[in-house]
Amino acid sequence: MKSSIPLWQRSSVRIVGALVLLILLGGAVGGIYYTQIPPEQPIPFPHNFHIGVGAQCSYCHTGAATGPNAGLPTTDKCWGCHQQIEPRNDNLKLVASYGSEGKQIPWVPVAIQPDFVVFSHQPHINAELTCETCHGDVARMTVAEPQKGQNMGWCLDCHQKMSTPEEFVLLSDCATCHY
């Protein structure tokens, strides 16, 4: 005999629906968390130490002021300093081995934008924003970490707070970042 209770009102369907919803929500939250865990690097690089001794972000990330991305330091850049500063440190022996083999250190980028986002540091530098505005207080980070929740809403919120209404119209145009 056919039930007179509509399908969407049956408790078993509601339970299954709730479980599916929880699984999807858990996957989304887990995916966001997983993508914001600092990747393991081939050589430990203590950002806090380097900043503490006076290194500027732009010294290692030379593309930030001139190119579409900040870039990562070359083996020559690292070894240029460290052949004279603590060359016997175990981690620096790894730098030396990459250099002697003529290989680049395979750094893993930390702040990655999706393929559908076009980003340039240049307008942010021209606006005199500091690296910390978007990347957090790297001077306190042993390992550079991606900023939690750094997404389109996060960017738009900052653009709205830091610009005039006229500027925000341009900054919130989809084509500004998606072309």
Image (tube, grey):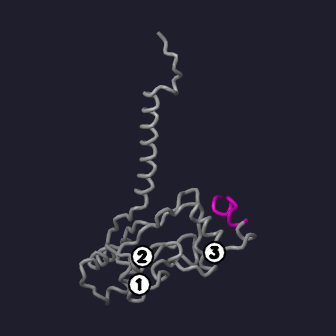
Nearest to viewer (mark 2 / mark 3): 3
Left or right side of 153 for 22 = left
In which quarter of the view is residue 67 placed?
Answer: bottom right
Q: CA separation, marks 2 and 3?
A: 25 Å
Secondary structure type for disc 1: helix
Q: Residue at x 56, y 64 (%)?
A: 154
Magenta-highlighted residues: 169-179
User: Magenta stretch containing residue 51, yes or no?
Assistant: no
Q: Residue at x 58, y 60 (%)?
A: 152
Q: Amino acid at mark 3?
A: Pro
Earlier-in-chain disc, 1 versus 2: 1
Mark 2: few, some, or many residues within 10 Å (few <14, many ≥20)? some
Q: Amino acid at mark 2?
A: Thr
Earlier-in-chain disc, 2 versus 3: 2
- Residue 54 on image: x %, y %: 42, 89
Secondary structure type for disc 3: helix
Secondary structure type for disc 2: loop
Residue carrying label 1: 51
Prevailing secondary structure of the magenta residues:
helix
Q: Considering the image in quadrants, where does the C terminus appear?
A: bottom right
Q: Residue furthest right?
A: 166
Residue carrying label 3: 123
Nearest to viewer (mark 1 / mark 2): 1
- Residue 156 on image: x %, y %: 62, 64
Q: Residue at x 68, y 73 (%)?
A: 163
Q: Residue at x 54, y 70 (%)?
A: 69
- C-beta proximity under 8 Å, tags 1 and 2: no
Left or right side of 119 for 168 = right
Mark 1: few, some, or many residues within 10 Å (few <14, many ≥20)? some
Residue carrying label 2: 74
